[in-house]
Amino acid sequence: MAITSIKNLKEFSTNNDRFEGAHTLCPGCAHSMIVRELMNCTDDNLVIASNTGCLEVSTAVYPFTSWDTSWIHIGFENAATAVSGAEAMFKARKKKGTLKDNDASVKFVAFGGDGSTYDIGFQWLSGAMERGHDFTYICLDNENYANTGGQRSSATPIGAHTSTAQAGTHSYGKKQKKKDIVAIMAAHDAPYVAQLAPNKWKSMAKGFQKALETEGPCFINTVSPCCTEWKFDPKDTINITDLATDTLMFPIYEIINGHELNILYRPKNVLPVEEYLAAQGRYKHLFKPENKHVIEEIQKNINEYWEMLQRREEARV
Amino acid sequence: MAEKFDLNEREVWDGNYAASQALRQAQVDVVAAYPITPSTPIVENYGAYVANGYIDGEFVMVESEHAAMSGCVGASAAGGRVATATSSQGFALMVEVLYQASGMRLPIVLTVVNRALASPLNVRGDHGDMYLGRDSGWIQIDAFNAQEAYDLTLCAFKIGENHDVRLPVMVHQDGFITSHTAQNVYPLSDEKAYGFIGDIVPVDDMLDFSRPVTYGAQTEEDWHFEHKAKQHKALMDSRTVIDDVFAEFEKLTGRKYNRVEGYDMDDAEVVIVALGTTVETARVAAQELREEGVKAGVVGIRVFRPFPFDQVRDMLENAKSIAVLDRSSPGGAMGAFFNEVSAALYTTPNRPLITNYIYGLGGRDFSVAEAKRIFLEQKANADAGHITTDIQQFSGLRGPHLGYFQTKRS
Ligand SMILES: Cc1ncc(C[n+]2csc(CCOP(=O)(O)OP(=O)(O)O)c2C)c(N)n1
Ligand code: SF4
Ligand SMILES: [Mg+2]
């Protein structure tokens, strides 16, 4: 069952504590905020799977665990399949009546970083979405392989410096644009797909609740600022997220049944992307005169994408 | 309740069908699978049983074998009975998850219909995939024919799900030779078969929310070694459970299985040690040679993991010359199976002569005549008192002889 009264952040953040604060994520890491939101927005029993990545290595180091609910990690690529299997077993055992509590309401959730979601686990995710398991997949998108020291992923935006797409005298960082995972997931005809951000915690909680309550495979991409690899002060995580949503670098929206697009946050005052880029070390080199064109390209991409989202919202296609 | 499935006292089944009937009788809750020749019919049949109400289970047709085993892991951690099947490339794609399944102590049953590994691509049987699984921490049981594929699949659930074991189990059969050859099979009644296996009693059930569990934690140098040691101990200790299950199965059916199957070994002087259908071929050859006065015997390995080191040693120590047959490309070394048998014999005072034959790769036929020739080479060794051939030889290969290493004498 969903927690209905999401009025007060303080109350909400201490509600139903099933994710313990004692973990080893970096101070200021947004992963834990997002996970906590998910776990606090419902009273239902949760079966959670995590792909390998910062979240997993920081929350279940034997003999400790941060998870006060059923949790499984198999490998880097297969959390979506782990919950597929668990969900299938839930159905089978419910039919046979062999569950400990046959009436318990259970939700299945998989977490993956952008590395596991956009890259190595892409096929596993696509398969699980196509099969239509009743689960929610949440991507913690920090736009790099943070756990292994900040390599590029296909979620890394153009122009960002990573250890495997370096900025240097002959390079402005990553050359390719970010993969549009939300569109790809919507194209799976998923009943609920969204992109959410932890600074907009109310819309995030509502989006999570919708996904949990919707029967079938749901996908949510969340922006998860990584102070270590994006290079900003850990106290600024939410400020950076505000810049991400107010420059429309990360627009917040949902797509229902593959076509009904709703924009969930419209900044009153859209900021130029420079403000977002200038706040992070990974984009520092873009402010050299020879890389000015990259910033222009990023701004152009943002404008075009926002235009497209608005048109699709209107057109409902 | 599952529909009733009528069975005759004697059926004519191939190995694949036999294995799938065992899955039906075990009332497997979840099969997550991906098709590959020659194991495909096993999971197709499971799907058909589900579609027609003969099983109350869930058939999850995933997008790769890696996902098949991943789905099995998630399902097994959720507390029910789980099985799947694969071969060759599919097995290779599963390997990462095989280690994760055994490390999490999940009693999944995997039928491996043995097939060669590419390249070159080949759909026929050899033991390349079986060898690839040998360090994965699974129990590996080998069936030599369709009846055994059926019997041992039933046993596999009972062994793996035993709370003193809690390990995944592979049941191997030879691609095509067993999987696609119809033979007489005597099945148990559904009640008897299920009664033998019993209900699965989950240990750390992810769907029991009164007791949350964390699966697949991280351990570094402080604890990893202890976990792996415990896992090895569980595998080694499973030997007594396997023996008990085989004994119980014998009581029920009269069919007796042993972790090592000796044939005419009491006074055998020359011996073939093999896996899979080759064991039966070698038995025929041994029988014929016995009529000619050659004291031939055969040792078949029924349980490849945990490897029956002491039983192999005890059965072979009084032989004079032994041929260990590897049906897997050795990749720049002696055959892995040869090395294991040799290691067991090294601990005996007599140390019989022992040589290695690489044979049957990619489904190359292994005939009774070839087995006889190998026995006679052992006889020549025994008579000479030393190895008269190369220590490793390829047998049944076209073109010039291929062999390596000779015995060092004096
Ligand atoms: C099959 C496999 N390949 C590579 C790795 C190494 N590895 C572990 S986590 C990781 C990156 C994780 O990145 P992401 O999914 O974005 O999660 P993050 O750590 O950024 O949250 C990599 C490359 C692995 N564990 N398994
Ligand atoms: S490296 Fe980044 S994603 Fe990983 S724990 Fe630190 S802040 Fe979080
Ligand atoms: Mg990442």
Image (spheres, coloured by chain):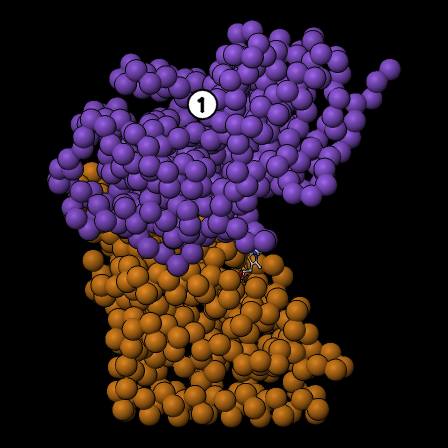
Percent position of residue A156, x then y: 55, 74
Farthest residue in the front direction?
B292
Of residues A12 and B76, which is closer to you in this image? B76
Residue at position x 76%, y 16% in the image: B386
The C terminus of chain B, quarter of image: top right
- Specify whether A216 is left or right of B303: left
Question: Which tint is chain A?
Answer: orange
Beta carbon of the mark 1 residue lies under 8 A of ligand 1: no
Q: For mark 1, name the chain.
A: B
How many marks on residues? 1
Of residues B71 and A58, which is closer to you in this image? B71
Residue at position x 64%, y 27% in the image: B338
Farthest residue in the right direction?
B410
Percent position of residue B218, x then y: 52, 44
Task: Tell me which amino acid carries mark 1.
Answer: Ser
Question: Which tint is chain B?
Answer: purple
- Specify whether B403 is left or right of A103: right
Q: Is residue B34 visible?
A: yes
Of residues B380 and B136, which is closer to you in this image? B380
- Specify whether A164 is left or right of B84: right
Residue at position x 53%, y 72% in the image: A154
Q: Which residue is mark 1?
A: B238
Q: Secondary structure at mark 1?
A: helix
Percent position of residue B120, x then y: 59, 53
Q: Is residue A269 above or below residue B314?
A: below
Occupied quadrant, residue B152: top left
Q: Is residue B145 above or below residue A218?
A: above
